[in-house]
Amino acid sequence: IRLGRFSLTDFSEKLGFTRYQSKKIADILVERHLFVVLPDPSKPAEIFYESRPSALSRPAARKPLDIWKKID
């Protein structure tokens, strides 16, 4: 899944899972702040998500400044 907006239908097609299975996976990713649920009043029966880069939800581990000394 690329960054941006997509529907649950698109997500389940990409995964090759049922809609129910895909919804369970999407719910877990929403809890981990990797997906955000977007309401769409024009299509109330469809659920839309927006994916976020993982860097926004988890800080990257920084390497020690003396890493080059350890490599040499």
Image (cartoon, helix red, strand yellow):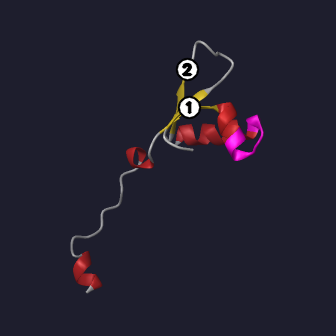
Assess whether residue 16 is covered by the magenta stretch.
Answer: yes
Quadrant assignment for the C terminus: bottom left
Residue displayed at 74% across by 45% down? 16
Left or right of 36 in this view: 72? left
Q: Tags 1 and 2 in contact by the CB under 8 Å rule?
A: no
Q: Is residue 45 above or below residue 13?
A: above
Residue 59 locus on image (x, y percent): 36, 52
Alpha-carbon span between mark 1 and mark 2: 8 Å
Please give the count of numbered marks on the rendered protein: 2
Q: Which mark is residue 35?
A: none
Q: Is residue 43 above or below residue 61?
A: above
Left or right of 58 in this view: 50? right
Residue displayed at 60% across by 12% down? 42
Q: Earlier in the sequence, mark 1 or mark 2?
A: 2
Q: Residues within 10 Å of mark 2 (few under 14, many from 20)?
A: few
- Viewer-proximal residue, 2 or 27? 2
Residue beneath disc 2: 39
Q: Residues within 10 Å of mark 1 (few under 14, many from 20)?
A: some
State the SS at label 1: strand
Residue 52 locus on image (x, y percent): 46, 40
Residue 55 locus on image (x, y percent): 39, 49
Tag 2: amino acid:
Pro
Q: Main secondary structure of the magenta part?
A: helix
Quarter holding residue 10: top right
Residue beneath disc 1: 49
Residue 1 locus on image (x, y percent): 57, 44
Quarter holding residue 17: top right
- Viewer-proximal residue, 9 or 60? 9
Q: In the rendered structure, which segment of residues is drawn in magenta? A: 13-20
Tag 1: amino acid:
Tyr
Residue lying furthest top in this view?
42
Left or right of 14 in this view: 66? left
